[in-house]
Image: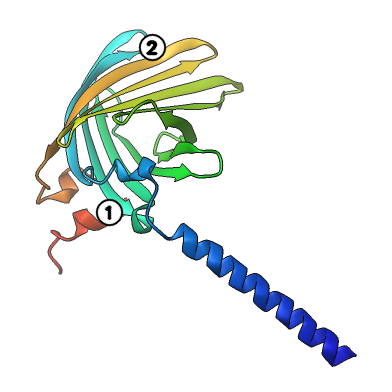
């Protein structure tokens, strides 16, 4: 009886594994249409940002480096933003679509202490709108992002933040696709690992 029970348990485990592999293989098929809209995005983009920070005018340069990941189910974007009188802002943004909640997600981690999951949807084939709601210093905090893909070589993004109902940041930039730089160190702060696309031009010692 003991051996029979053991064999029965092994069969159950094997069936569960097969079911799991089947579900996983289905998920590994063609990426959803929500992510296929990014197929021409990978590469380097640059632009000039203008807006307000805490009610004062602000401007600066922005660079975005995109690459596909997870077999097309994800897009990673490395962002570097240099604004007037503030330290360089460096952020990694992971784009993905969740079939469960039918929402787009951008998970962001930055050197300013941000670790946020922005959630939203495509308003149309070109406009992606997302929002993060959380707390900052014990008070309500909100971020709103909107990206409008105008063409294969141009997109416009707007970012707004609110702390306890008061707007603290509101800026936008038009990004243009640019040739890949030959000196990745110039746009990537020291000490941060370089994305795969930026490593290939670095000479080996």
| Residue at left offset 29%, top offset 29% | 126
Q: Residue 156: tell me if it is visible.
A: yes
Q: Are marks 1 and 2 in contact (CB under 8 Å)?
A: no
> Which residue carries the number 1 mark?
195
Q: Residue 191: tell me if it is visible.
A: no
| Residue at left offset 48%, top offset 61% | 26
Whether 47 is drawn above or below 24: the answer is above
- Residue 6: percent from left, percent from top: 80, 86
Give the left or right position of residue 81, taking residue 137 as reference.
left
Q: Nearer the viewer, residue 18 or 40?
A: 18
Around disc 1, counting alpha carbons within 10 Å, would you say few (fewer than 14), some (14 to 19), or many (20 or more)?
A: some
* Element on which disc 2 rests: loop
The circle drawn on residue 147 is none
* Element on which disc 1 rests: loop
Q: On the rendered image, what quadrant is the C terminus found in?
A: bottom left
- Residue 129: percent from left, percent from top: 39, 26
- Residue 49: percent from left, percent from top: 22, 22
Q: Nearer the viewer, residue 116 or 124?
A: 124
Colour scheme shown: rainbow
Q: Which of the two discs, 1 and 2, sits closer to the camera?
A: 1
- Residue 25: percent from left, percent from top: 48, 65
| Residue at left offset 17%, top offset 61% | 200
Give the left or right position of residue 101, taking residue 3 as reference.
left
> Which residue carries the number 2 mark?
54
| Residue at left offset 73%, top offset 82% | 10
């Amino acid at each position: 009886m003991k051996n029979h029970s053991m064999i029965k348990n092994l069969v159950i485990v094997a069936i569960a594994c097969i079911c799991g592999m089947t579900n996983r293989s289905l998920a590994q098929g063609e990426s959803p249409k929500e992510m296929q809209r990014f197929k021409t995005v990978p590469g380097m983009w640059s632009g000039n940002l203008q807006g307000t920070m805490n009610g004062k005018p602000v401007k600066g340069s922005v660079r975005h480096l995109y690459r596909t990941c997870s077999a097309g189910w994800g897009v990673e974007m490395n962002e570097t933003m240099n604004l007037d009188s503030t330290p360089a802002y460096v952020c990694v943004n992971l784009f993905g679509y969740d079939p469960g909640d039918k929402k787009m997600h951008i998970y962001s981690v930055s050197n300013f202490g941000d670790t946020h999951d922005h959630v939203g949807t495509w308003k149309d084939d070109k406009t992606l709108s997302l929002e993060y709601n959380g707390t900052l210093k014990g008070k309500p905090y909100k971020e709103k992002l909107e990206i409008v893909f105008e063409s294969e070589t141009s997109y416009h993004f707007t970012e707004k933040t609110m702390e306890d109902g008061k707007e603290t940041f509101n800026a936008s930039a038009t990004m243009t696709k640019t040739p890949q730089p030959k000196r990745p160190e110039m746009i990537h702060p020291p000490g941060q690992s370089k994305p795969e696309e930026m490593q290939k031009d670095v000479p080996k010692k």
